[in-house]
Image (tube, rainbow, N blue to C red):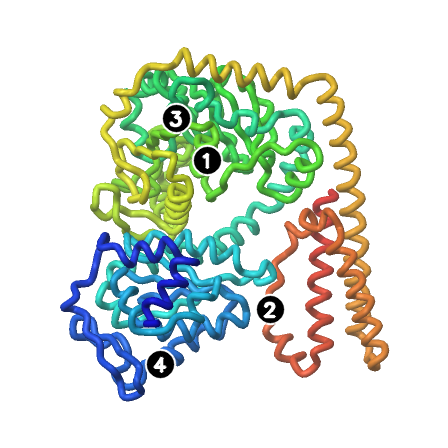
Amino acid sequence: MSFWESNKKILSEQYGGLLDEITSEKGELLPSQDIKIEITPCGEPSLCVKGIYVHSPRDPLREGQRLAQAVDSGNGPVVVLGFGLGYAAQAAAKIASGSGRPVIVVEKYANLLRKAMELRDFGDFLSNNRIIFVVGGTGEGITGALGIANELISAENADKKPSVIRNKALTDLDEKWYGAVEDKIRTWTMRDDVNAATLKRFGRRWVHNLSRNMRAICEFPGISRLADLAAAGESPALPVFLAAAGPSLDRISPLLRDIYRRCIVVAVDTNLRFFVKNGVEPDFVLVVDPQFWNSRHLDFCSCERTALIAESAVYPPILRLPFKNIFLCGSLFPLGMFIEKQVDPKGRLGAGGSVATTAWDFARILGGSEIWIAGLDLAYPNLKTHFRGARFEERANSLSVRFNPTEKWVTRALRDGLPFKARSANGEPVLTDRRLSLYAAWFENQFRKYPQVKNFGVFRDGLEISGLQSVETDALLSLPERRDEIDRRIEDAFLKTEKEFNDVENSRERAKKYENAVSGLKRGLASIKKTAEDGASIARQALKRELNAAQKDKVIKDLDALTRRVTESEVKEVAGFLLPLIEDDKEKTSTDSSDPFRTYLNSTLKLFSGLAQAAEINLK
C-alpha cells in the first residue's frame, strides 16, 4: 500500500473534512510547476517551492528534530506554521505527546499538504488524537483551533501559552498570510494577561457588588426564559438589531425609528442615552460592567419600556432603576455561580470582555436568524473613540481645564491601549488597540461557532471582522414592519415569566433555597479560612526550626490533609477567586533551591496565607 493510500485511510476515518479539503481543487493552490521534490543523501524527500529549499537538502529529518526542540518548554499547544513535508510537525508531536500537548498545523496550501501525504508515512502522527489542522482561507481558523487545544490541555497547567515553530522558508514566501495568523496567535496569548490584569483591578469590586446583589438572584428571573423569543410562532423569525457604542453609531440615528418598527432592538448601557436622545426606547439593554462610573451611562435615561439584562455583579443601584422588567444572565464569577446553582440557574451568556460581546450572545439566544449590527467599530476611525454625546465625551468635557484639556483625555484613551494599525472593513488601515482586537477575535470565533446566525453590519468604519457581512441600509429598511408582532411576543414572554417565576409556591421554595445557600456559603468560607490559617501556621513554625526526617514527614502529612480539606470544600472556587497570584520569589528560590523541603514550605505558606486572606474578604 502506498503512503497516500495508508494516510488517506486514516484521514477518512479521523479527519474527513481535511481529506475533502486536500483532495478538492477549490481554494488557493500552489502551482505544480512551483513544487519540486528531491531525494536527499539520507534517503528522505526534500521540498523546493519556487526555487527555495523548504527543508534541508541533506538531512531534513534531523533538521525537523532540531526545530522541534522549542517544544521542550511550556505547557501550551504547539503551533507549526508551514507544514511542508511534515518533518518538524512529526518531531514536535513526538515530544509533545509525553505531556499531552496538542499540535496545531497551519498550512496555507491544501495541495502542499496532499503532496506530503503522498510522499511520507504519517500513520503515527495522524493517529494522535491531539493533532488539529488549519488549512487555507484567511487563516482565521487558528483562533478556533487554539480554543479546542485549550480544552484538551490539563486544567492543572495554568500556563497554556502556545509554542510556535516556523518553517521560515514557507512563512517568508507568504509573509502576509502567516503574519496575519501570528497576529491572531498573539491576540489569543494576550487574553490571559488581560484577564489577570482585569481580575487584579476589579476582583474585589465584583465580590463586593455580588455580596450586595445576592438576593437579586432569588428575586429576578433568568434570561433562559427569553430563549427563542424571536423564533416563537409560525411566522418567520424576528430580526434583531444590536447597537454597539462605536463612533459609526452616529450615522444610524436618522434611521432608528424605522429600525424600531422592524426589529427587536438590543442596546448596551454605553449607548442607552443615544436611543433616549433620539426618541426610541430599546426593547432590551445590557449591563455587565461592575464599576460605579459605568452605571453613570444610565443617568437621566428613560427606561419604562425597556427590559434590563444584567449580570449579578453590576453596581447595585442599577438593579433599583425603574426598568420595565429585569432579567439576570448567569454569573461569571464563582460567588454568583454558587448561589445560582442552588437557587435558580439563569442561563449563561458569552463574555468576550466587552458588553457588546455579551449583547451579541443575548441577541443570538433570542433566536433571531438575522442580527443587524451598528456601531461595532472596535477601532478609532478618524481618531474617534465613541459616538457623539457618550458619557466618556461628556465627562472629558466637564473635567477639562487649561492644563488638562479634553484633547489630552482623548490622546490618553488612544495611547493607553497599545494602539496599532490594522485592516478596516473598507480595506484601509485603521487605528485599533490590543483590547479591541481581542473583542474582534471573540466575535470571529462566535460567528464561526454559530454559522446559522447571519450577521450584517451597517456603516462599517472600523476593524474588519470575519463573518460580519457589510450591507447598505436599504437592505435593513427593506425588512417588513413587525412592531405589533414584536411587542406582542415580548409581552407574552413577560407575562408567562411573571406567572411562573413569581408563583407563590415557587417564590417560597426559592427563598428557602436561598437562605440555605447563603448559610452553606458562610460555613464553607469560615471552614476554609480556619483550615488555611492552620496550614500557614504549620508551615511558618516549620520554617523556624531544624526538623529531622520523621518531623518533616509529619509536617508534610499534616499539610496534605489540610490541602485535601480545602479541595473537597464545595466553596473552594469562591474562596480561591481572590487568591493573590503566587509569584516566584527568584531570590528566595535560588537561596532555598538546595533544600526542596524549605522551598515546599515557602510556597505552601504563600498559598495558605493568600487563601485565608481571600476567604476573609469574601466573609466580610
| Element class at badge 4 | helix
Q: x, y (%) of residue 183?
A: 34, 57
Question: Quadrant of the rendered structure where residue 68 is?
Answer: bottom left
Structural distance between the alpha carbons of marks 3 and 4: 55 Å
Distance (Cα) linking label 3 and label 1: 11 Å
* Discs 2/3, front: 3
Q: Which mark is residue 85?
A: none
Q: Is residue 337 left or right of residue 62?
A: right
Separation of marks 2 and 3 at Cα, in angstroms:
49 Å
The mark lying in front, picked from 3 and 4, is 4
Instruction: Identify the residue shown where x is 52% and y is 25%.
Output: 226
Q: Residues within 10 Å of mark 3 (few under 14, many from 20)?
A: many
Tag on residue 584?
A: 2
Residue at 33%, 16% in the rendered image: 257
Residue 132 rendering spot, x and y as whole percentages? 42, 60
Q: Secondary structure at mark 3?
A: strand
Mark 4 crowdedness (10 Å alpha carbons): few <14, some 14-19, many ≥20 = many
The residue pinned by badge 1 equals 361
> Which residue is pictured at 16% across the width and 68% down the height?
34
Q: Nearer the viewer, mark 4 or mark 1?
A: 4
Q: In the displayed structure, would residue 61 be above or below residue 132?
A: below
| Amino acid type at mark 2 | Asp
Quick one: label 2 or label 4, which is nearer the N terminus? Answer: 4
2 vs 4, front mark: 4
Query: The residue under label 1 is which amino acid type?
Result: Asp
Instruction: Tell me, yes or no, if residue 551 can be seen here.
Output: yes
Q: In the image, 363: left or right of 383?
A: right
Tell me which numbered mark, 3 or 1, is placed earlier along the sequence. 3
- Asked whether the residues under the numbered discs 3 and 1 touch, taking CB atoms below 8 Å apart as contact, a structural biologist would say no
State the residue position of label 4.
61
Residue pointed to by mark 3: 240
Front one among 391 and 143: 143
